[in-house]
Image (tube, rainbow, N blue to C red):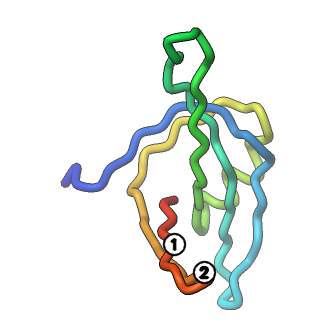
Amino acid sequence: MSLNNQVFLHGRLARDPELRQTKTDKAVCRFTMATDEGKTQSGEKITEFHNVTAWNRWAEFVAKRFKKGDPILIWRRNHTSSYEKDGHKVYTTS
């Protein structure tokens, strides 16, 4: 197995997962997870928020078993996309 573009995240769900169906009847679940990134020099906790998308059986599994505040471990690939907003290209990673 290639380890190119592999992401490992361990954190907690920042909101409840949202399960939807695509027009082609595929399950898709979107949620946000929070990870702790350490502390600033003044002692404030640094938290990163990550947008996560799960598809098909994984989407159904996450939506059924997890809720806001639950710990979760993610191991998948990173996906970057872009869109135009006010004449500027905006990049998102999920």
CB of mark 2 within 8 Å of CB of mark 1?
Answer: yes
Amino acid type at circle 1 is Val
**Mark 2 neighbour class, 10 Å CA radius: few under 14, some 14 to 19, many 20 or more:** few
The picture places residue 7, in percent across and down from the top left corner, at 38, 46
Could you say which quadrant of the image residue 35 lies in?
top right
Could you say which quadrant of the image residue 71 lies in?
top right
Amino acid type at circle 2 is Lys
Residue depicted at 56% across the width and 25% down the height: 36
> In the displayed structure, does residue 33 sit left or right of residue 78?
right
Residue depicted at 57% across the width and 47% down the height: 50
Q: In the rendered view, would you say 11 is above or below 84?
A: above
**Mark 1 neighbour class, 10 Å CA radius: few under 14, some 14 to 19, many 20 or more:** few
Q: Which mark is residue 85?
A: 2
The picture places residue 45, in percent across and down from the top left corner, at 61, 19
Identify the mark nearer the N-term, 2 or 1: 2
**Residue carrying label 1:** 90
> In the displayed structure, does residue 55 sit left or right of residue 17?
left
Which residue is more in the foreground, 38 or 12?
38
Residue depicted at 60% across the width and 81% down the height: 85
Residue depicted at 80% across the width and 47% down the height: 16
Identify the element where label 1 is drawn.
strand
